[in-house]
Amino acid sequence: KSVHDSSVTYGCGTYSCQSGKNSSSYLNLFQEHCITHEIMRRVSPTEAELIKDPSMKCKVRFRFAGQEFPPFIVFKIFRHTQGKGSKYISGKRIISPSNEAAADACKLMGYRKYYEQIVQDELQYQKQRITDETDVATMKDYMHYISNLDETPAYFGGRNNCWRRLSLKNFPRTMIVYDIMDYAQSRTLSDRLKKELKFLLLRPQNKELWHDQLMAVSLIRSSFPCNSSVTSLFCSDRPTTVSMQSTRCSSQARQKIAKMKRAYLCEKEREAQKLDIKNRSDFTEHQEATISQVEKPEDQSILTDEEWEHEAAKLYAWSQALPLEDVG
């Protein structure tokens, strides 16, 4: 009986682990095809706009990382150059000791900053051993050099395009992806995920099922669940209509948010203008008070001079009245 219980427990654990792996694998696929822009917009709006540019031909890859289960998701941006290659401009490769740019850079940066850069380059070389194109001898060295170039920060001459970790706050709450990631971290199933889990774990046998699974994951849902059976049946029968309605609602919501942002910014500008006018008036009043305080001693000195002139005139008149004998 104990052997039977242990085998059942092992089977349940294996099934649970395999289900988690399958859902996680499909989640990676869904992210690359459906919600890449939504995630990148939350991580970095500037990079999201760059990825949308068709001339850049960028693609975001997702994969699992971590030494224990459940793993966490990391992402990296790749650019397809179609065999033409791309040139990264870096001062570390352009400025060499043989040209005058090194001396000019030392003058501009200062000796201390320049020495720190040299020490950092030497430490990086001692650690990696392949930090420059001249260190590459085999294909393995080249792959190692490219990997180091991606992981090195830009201020040290690298690309700063390493694998970055995604957290739960980077996933939109209105999508079921948030529930899947929450389940991977906390091992708690939400009500919304319980309804969709059986359908998401199905192995796609054709393109229609695969497309339906993609739509189920990428669909933007409302914050409140559909409790009635009629509503749930209608939602299951009309996925295209619901997705169109949710798309329209999302566009309307984006327009409303943009309008609120413009109103907020206008209000901020008006407050800044009022504060600027108030500061200017306070400064003018303070300046006038300072000028008046400076002018007061001058007025006092003018009054003192008049009194002195009056006293001098009286003294002169008194001296004129004196007889010559007294003066001698």
Image (cartoon, rainbow, N blue to C red):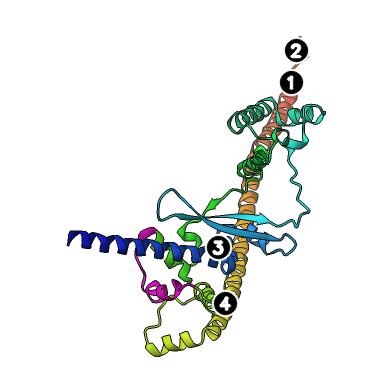
Disc 2 + disc 3, Cβ < 8 Å:
no
Given the image, on which type of amino acid does mark 3 rest? Ile
Return the disc, 1 or 2, that comes first in the chain's sequence. 1
SS at circle 3: helix
Q: Residue 136 or 170: which is nearer the viewer?
A: 136
Query: With 228 as the anchor, is 72 left or right in this view?
Result: right
Dot 4, crowdedness within 10 Å: few (<14), some or many (≥20)? few
Q: Position of residue 298 (x, y in %)?
A: 68, 36
Q: CA distance from mark 1 to mark 2?
A: 9 Å
Magenta-colored span:
185-203
Given the image, on which type of amino acid does mark 1 rest? Ser
Location of mark 1 (residue): 319
Return the disc, 2 or 4, that comes first in the chain's sequence. 4
In what quadrant of the picture does the C terminus appear?
Answer: top right
Return the disc, 1 or 4, that comes first in the chain's sequence. 4
**At 77% across and 27% down in the image, what residue appears?**
97
Considering the whole magenta stretch, tell me its main secondary structure.
helix
Q: Residue 184 or 97: which is nearer the viewer?
A: 184
Label number found at residue 39: 3
Label number found at residue 207: 4
Dot 2, crowdedness within 10 Å: few (<14), some or many (≥20)? few
The nearer-to-camera label among 2 and 4 is 4
Residue at the bottom extreme, as displayed: 230
Disc 1 + disc 2, Cβ < 8 Å:
yes
Label number found at residue 327: 2
Disc 1 + disc 3, Cβ < 8 Å:
no
SS at circle 4: helix
**At 63% across and 62% down in the image, what residue appears?**
269
Query: With 211 as the anchor, is 67 left or right in this view?
Result: left
Return the disc, 1 or 3, that comes first in the chain's sequence. 3
Compared to residue 304, the image places residue 316 above or below, namely above
